[in-house]
Structure formats: C-alpha cells, structure tokens
Image (cartoon, rainbow, N blue to C red):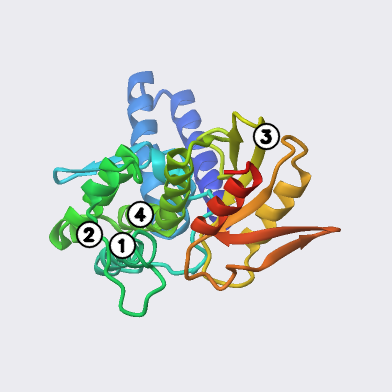
Amino acid sequence: MLVRRLALGLAAIGGGVLAVLLALDRLTPVQAVAVAVAGIVALCSAVAAIAPKQFPAHLLRRVKSFGFGGASFELFEVARESVAEGDDSGERSKTLLALKMRLESKLTYVAKHMLALDPSAKHNIPAFVTIGSLAYDKLLTEEQAHLAYAIIGLQEPQFRELSPAERTVILEGADDFIGSVRASILEKLSITVLEAKGWLVKRVYSESSKWRDLRVRSRNPDVEHRVVPVFTLKRESKFLEQAAARLVNDRAGDGERLIIVPPLSKAVGTAVTVGARQVPVLSLPAAVERLNSARGG
C-alpha cells in the first residue's frame, strides 16, 4: 500500500511539473511526451527497486511470458497452477540452486512414491521418469514441460545478470509451479487410471479453475460420482477440508463422494466430516476399487 501511494504521489508531482512547463512554453508537446515516457520508465524502476518482492508478485498474474539469454519462461500455466489446490508443504526457494533442487525432488517423489509398482515398499523400485516421459504420458502439459526444462536449463551467470525484481519474478513464478506439480500429476494420473478402467472422466470446473474436482461416470449402470484428487501428506489439511465441503455441497450426481490422496499420505483411510456427512479419503487404487464395486464390476 505504501509503495502504491508513493508511486501515485510521484506520478502526480511529475504530471503537475509537466503541466506547468507546458503552460510556460518551456516544453513542446513532443518533448513533453518524451519526458512523460521516460518518467514512467523511471517510476517503474524506482518502484521495483523499492519493493523488489512486492512488485513482481503483483505483475506475475499478468505476465504471459518472460524471456532472456535464450531462455523463455511461459508463465500462463504458472498463473493457473499457482492458485490451484497444490502441495501444502509450504516450501519456498530463495536461490536458483534451491529452485532446481526442489523441482528435482518433487519429480523424484513422483517416481518413487506415485508411479512405482509398490510405492509403499520400504525399498521400492522407482519408476524411471523424465520431464519428457511425463509429458509423453500426459502427466505434464506441454506448457508445464516447457517451464520445467527452462528451470533446469537456466544458468547461474544468466540469473545473476537479472535485476532483483526480475529474479523475484522467476523464483516466485517457478516456485508456484513447482509447489503444484505433484498435485497436477496426481490429478492427471487419476484421470488416466480411471479412464483405463472404463470410466468417463471430466473436470467439473474449467481448466482455468483452481479446483481439480472430477466427474466420474459409468454408462451401465448410468451413475455419476464426484472425486477430488488432493496432494497432501498430512492427516489433516485445509485442502482436504475444502475438497470435502465442495463434494458435500455438490448436489449433481447420485454416486460416491471420494477424495484421492497419494499412497504415503497420512490421510489414507480416514474421512473428513462435513455436517452429518463423511467423505472417505483413499489412495488411487482403493478409490478405483470402491468405484468399481459400486457399479458391480
């Protein structure tokens, strides 16, 4: 708020000075326009310097792409995923190295504990995954894969050449993407597995929505369930509570109401109580088994 007031105050003073100079014939209209443009640029730079953490965060939702040094960051997907229900670990990256390590750790978790044949085994055999293989299997979108490659490919010398405000744009935007990547993969994995079992699966809300609720329907018998994939490793989470509330309040469909969490989540096998209703929290295999039992298959 203070930065906004300061910027508006400086803009007002600058506008007043230009008006006086024009009135006194000290500037031509063309010169006034040139001075105004230069002033706007200087003002933006000053605001960025004064509030390097606030400035990019406000612009992040409006920036579609950000390119430099041969690397291009497409932030459209980041803008959507950053407000979506995602990973509730609360981690943030303060350096480029920490950012890369965090992305790799998230993808390693997917390989070990989400895509492995036995994710719960003490010495399990991880699935072999790369950014490209996840995109090929449609567990990452093309935009997500592009951003992941850009994060891994960004070099420290390039990063140091950026201004503090630009570095914050990269760190905050990429961090939001990384924070939701496992939740996004869990959603896409749930869709893939359910469709392979013969279910018709569609998102309840649009792709731009922050909610990952799924409409799961069978042809015979004609029944419609509601399922919400939620990535949390905790027994209790605001994401679980929010998903359960939506499921209970959603009157459409006459079938099951289920929440899907990762295999190692402490919430597996529990239920979230909303009023007089309880919403089961299950792993993906258990959820599929329950839905198949409901249709007698």
Q: Nearer the viewer, mark 4 or mark 3?
A: 3
Nearer the camera: disc 2 or disc 3: 3
Residue 282 at x, y percent in the picture = 58, 61
Where in the figure is residue 234, as x and y percent of width and height? Answer: 56, 72
Q: In the figure, residue 144 lies in which quadrant?
A: top left
- Left or right: where 156 falls relative to 127: left
- Amino acid at circle 4: Ala
Distance of label 2 from label 4 (alpha carbons): 24 Å
Other residues around mark 2 within 10 Å, as few (<14) / some (14–19) / many (≥20):
few
Mark 4 or mark 3, which has the lower sequence index? 4
Instruction: Report, in whole angstroms, how far the alpha carbon at label 2 lies from the one at label 1.
Output: 6 Å
Q: Earlier in the sequence, mark 2 or mark 1?
A: 1
Q: Earlier in the sequence, mark 2 or mark 4?
A: 2
Give the structural element (helix, strand or loop) at label 1: helix
Question: Cα distance, mark 3 to mark 1?
Answer: 33 Å
Say what amino acid the circle numbered 1 marks: Ala
Q: Which comes before the other along the chain, label 2 or label 3? A: 2
Label disc, if present, on residue 128 of the rendered structure: 2
Q: Image point 57% across, 43% down: which residue?
A: 297
Residue assigned mark 3: 223
Please, what is the three-letter code of the amino acid marked with disc 2?
A: Phe
Q: Is residue 1 visible?
A: no
Q: Nearer the viewer, mark 4 or mark 1?
A: 1
In the picture of the structure, the residue carrying the numbered disc 1 is 111
The CA span between labels 4 and 3 is 40 Å
Q: Amino acid at mark 3?
A: Val
Q: Nearer the viewer, residue 148 or 243?
A: 243
- Which residue is label 4 attached to? 174
Measured in 3D between alpha carbons, the distance from the residue under mark 4 to the one under mark 1, in whole angstroms, is 21 Å
